[in-house]
Amino acid sequence: MPDLIGENGLIKPEYTCDGDGASPEIIWSRAPPETKSFALYCHDPDAPAGNWIHWIIINIPADENRIPKHGPVPGVEVINDFGRTSYGGPCPPSGVHRYYFIVYALSVEELEGVTKQNFLDKIRGIILAKTEVIGRYKRS
Protein backbone atom coordinates (compact mmCIF):
# COMPACT_ATOMS: atom_id res chain seq x y z
CA MET A 1 0.00 0.00 0.00
CA PRO A 2 2.44 2.48 -1.38
CA ASP A 3 1.24 5.86 -0.25
CA LEU A 4 -1.06 5.22 2.72
CA ILE A 5 1.47 4.94 5.51
CA GLY A 6 4.29 7.38 6.13
CA GLU A 7 7.02 7.63 8.72
CA ASN A 8 6.83 5.56 11.90
CA GLY A 9 3.90 3.55 10.52
CA LEU A 10 1.52 6.51 10.77
CA ILE A 11 -1.25 6.96 8.23
CA LYS A 12 -0.70 10.12 6.23
CA PRO A 13 -3.09 12.94 7.21
CA GLU A 14 -4.51 13.27 3.68
CA TYR A 15 -6.29 9.92 4.26
CA THR A 16 -7.87 11.10 7.54
CA CYS A 17 -10.40 13.64 8.82
CA ASP A 18 -7.48 16.03 9.33
CA GLY A 19 -6.85 16.03 5.57
CA ASP A 20 -9.28 15.64 2.70
CA GLY A 21 -10.22 12.09 3.73
CA ALA A 22 -9.10 10.67 0.39
CA SER A 23 -9.61 6.97 -0.08
CA PRO A 24 -6.15 5.41 -0.35
CA GLU A 25 -4.70 3.33 -3.14
CA ILE A 26 -4.68 -0.32 -2.16
CA ILE A 27 -2.60 -2.81 -4.18
CA TRP A 28 -2.21 -6.56 -3.67
CA SER A 29 -0.56 -9.46 -5.47
CA ARG A 30 0.01 -13.22 -5.44
CA ALA A 31 -3.59 -14.31 -5.03
CA PRO A 32 -4.29 -18.04 -5.19
CA PRO A 33 -5.17 -19.16 -8.76
CA GLU A 34 -8.62 -20.34 -7.64
CA THR A 35 -9.61 -16.83 -6.45
CA LYS A 36 -13.06 -15.82 -7.74
CA SER A 37 -13.26 -12.37 -6.08
CA PHE A 38 -11.73 -10.12 -3.45
CA ALA A 39 -13.12 -8.16 -0.52
CA LEU A 40 -11.57 -5.33 1.49
CA TYR A 41 -12.25 -4.68 5.16
CA CYS A 42 -10.87 -1.67 7.05
CA HIS A 43 -11.55 -1.29 10.75
CA ASP A 44 -10.36 0.36 13.97
CA PRO A 45 -10.43 -2.05 16.93
CA ASP A 46 -9.42 0.76 19.31
CA ALA A 47 -12.55 2.90 18.87
CA PRO A 48 -14.38 3.85 22.09
CA ALA A 49 -17.59 2.22 20.82
CA GLY A 50 -15.73 -0.99 19.95
CA ASN A 51 -14.69 -2.17 16.50
CA TRP A 52 -15.36 0.75 14.10
CA ILE A 53 -15.73 -0.18 10.43
CA HIS A 54 -14.26 2.39 8.05
CA TRP A 55 -14.62 0.63 4.70
CA ILE A 56 -15.98 -2.60 3.24
CA ILE A 57 -15.82 -3.47 -0.44
CA ILE A 58 -17.13 -6.78 -1.79
CA ASN A 59 -17.36 -8.43 -5.22
CA ILE A 60 -14.05 -7.06 -6.45
CA PRO A 61 -13.37 -9.05 -9.65
CA ALA A 62 -10.64 -11.69 -9.50
CA ASP A 63 -8.69 -9.97 -12.29
CA GLU A 64 -8.32 -6.78 -10.23
CA ASN A 65 -5.38 -6.13 -7.92
CA ARG A 66 -5.85 -2.46 -7.12
CA ILE A 67 -8.25 0.08 -5.71
CA PRO A 68 -7.15 3.47 -7.03
CA LYS A 69 -6.72 6.52 -4.81
CA HIS A 70 -10.03 8.45 -4.80
CA GLY A 71 -11.66 5.50 -6.65
CA PRO A 72 -13.53 4.43 -8.60
CA VAL A 73 -13.94 1.29 -6.57
CA PRO A 74 -13.94 -1.95 -8.61
CA GLY A 75 -16.63 -3.60 -6.52
CA VAL A 76 -19.58 -2.88 -4.24
CA GLU A 77 -19.15 -0.72 -1.16
CA VAL A 78 -21.12 -1.68 1.95
CA ILE A 79 -22.51 0.83 4.45
CA ASN A 80 -19.87 1.46 7.13
CA ASP A 81 -20.08 2.84 10.66
CA PHE A 82 -20.18 6.39 9.26
CA GLY A 83 -23.50 5.42 7.64
CA ARG A 84 -22.21 5.71 4.09
CA THR A 85 -20.97 3.51 1.27
CA SER A 86 -17.55 5.05 0.90
CA TYR A 87 -14.24 5.24 2.71
CA GLY A 88 -14.31 6.94 6.09
CA GLY A 89 -10.87 8.15 7.10
CA PRO A 90 -9.36 7.80 10.55
CA CYS A 91 -10.52 10.39 13.08
CA PRO A 92 -9.73 9.04 16.55
CA PRO A 93 -11.15 11.10 19.43
CA SER A 94 -8.03 10.52 21.55
CA GLY A 95 -4.83 8.55 21.61
CA VAL A 96 -3.24 6.41 18.92
CA HIS A 97 -5.54 4.01 17.10
CA ARG A 98 -4.70 1.08 14.83
CA TYR A 99 -6.33 0.75 11.41
CA TYR A 100 -6.35 -2.65 9.74
CA PHE A 101 -6.64 -2.75 5.94
CA ILE A 102 -7.33 -6.39 5.01
CA VAL A 103 -7.79 -7.80 1.51
CA TYR A 104 -9.38 -11.25 1.32
CA ALA A 105 -9.14 -13.60 -1.67
CA LEU A 106 -12.44 -15.48 -1.83
CA SER A 107 -13.62 -18.69 -3.48
CA VAL A 108 -16.94 -17.21 -4.64
CA GLU A 109 -17.55 -14.68 -7.38
CA GLU A 110 -20.30 -12.72 -5.68
CA LEU A 111 -21.49 -12.11 -2.14
CA GLU A 112 -25.09 -11.07 -1.49
CA GLY A 113 -26.87 -9.60 1.49
CA VAL A 114 -23.67 -8.30 3.08
CA THR A 115 -23.89 -5.75 5.88
CA LYS A 116 -21.24 -4.38 8.22
CA GLN A 117 -22.69 -6.64 10.93
CA ASN A 118 -22.52 -9.90 8.94
CA PHE A 119 -19.50 -9.38 6.67
CA LEU A 120 -17.09 -11.59 8.65
CA ASP A 121 -19.72 -14.34 8.97
CA LYS A 122 -20.47 -14.19 5.23
CA ILE A 123 -16.82 -14.75 4.27
CA ARG A 124 -16.11 -17.42 6.88
CA GLY A 125 -15.33 -20.66 5.09
CA ILE A 126 -14.68 -19.05 1.68
CA ILE A 127 -11.41 -17.24 2.45
CA LEU A 128 -8.54 -18.57 0.33
CA ALA A 129 -5.94 -16.06 1.52
CA LYS A 130 -5.64 -12.65 3.12
CA THR A 131 -3.11 -9.88 3.41
CA GLU A 132 -3.18 -6.95 5.78
CA VAL A 133 -1.46 -3.73 6.58
CA ILE A 134 -1.83 -1.97 9.90
CA GLY A 135 -1.45 1.79 10.06
CA ARG A 136 -1.68 3.95 13.15
CA TYR A 137 -3.04 7.44 13.55
CA LYS A 138 -3.27 10.08 16.26
CA ARG A 139 -4.79 13.50 15.73
CA SER A 140 -2.50 16.47 16.33
Image: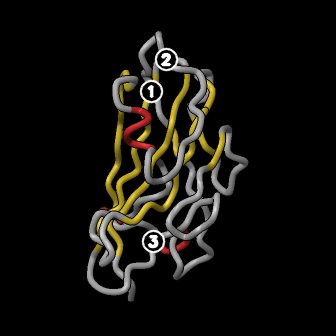
Q: How many marks?
A: 3
Give the x, y percent position of residue 37.
Answer: 55, 25
Task: Give the image quarter of residue 24.
Answer: bottom right
| First along the sequence among labels 2 and 1 | 2
SS assignment at label 1:
strand
SS assignment at label 3:
loop
| Distance (Cα) linking label 3 and label 2 | 30 Å
**In the rendered image, is residue 8 in sight?**
no
- Left or right: where does residue 139 sit relative to residue 14? left
Q: Is 11 placed above or below 132 here?
A: below
Q: Badges 1 and 3: C-beta atoms under 8 Å apart?
A: no
SS assignment at label 2:
loop
Residue 105 tag number: 1
Give the x, y percent position of residue 59.
Answer: 60, 33
Residue 35 tag number: 2
- Left or right: where does residue 18 sit relative to residue 129? right
| Distance (Cα) linking label 2 and label 1 | 6 Å
Residue of label 3: 90
Q: Badges 2 and 1: C-beta atoms under 8 Å apart?
A: yes
Give the x, y percent position of residue 89.
Answer: 51, 69
Give the x, y percent position of residue 82.
Answer: 55, 70
Q: Nearer the viewer, residue 98 or 52?
A: 52
| Residue drawn at x 52%, y 20% as measured from the top left | 108
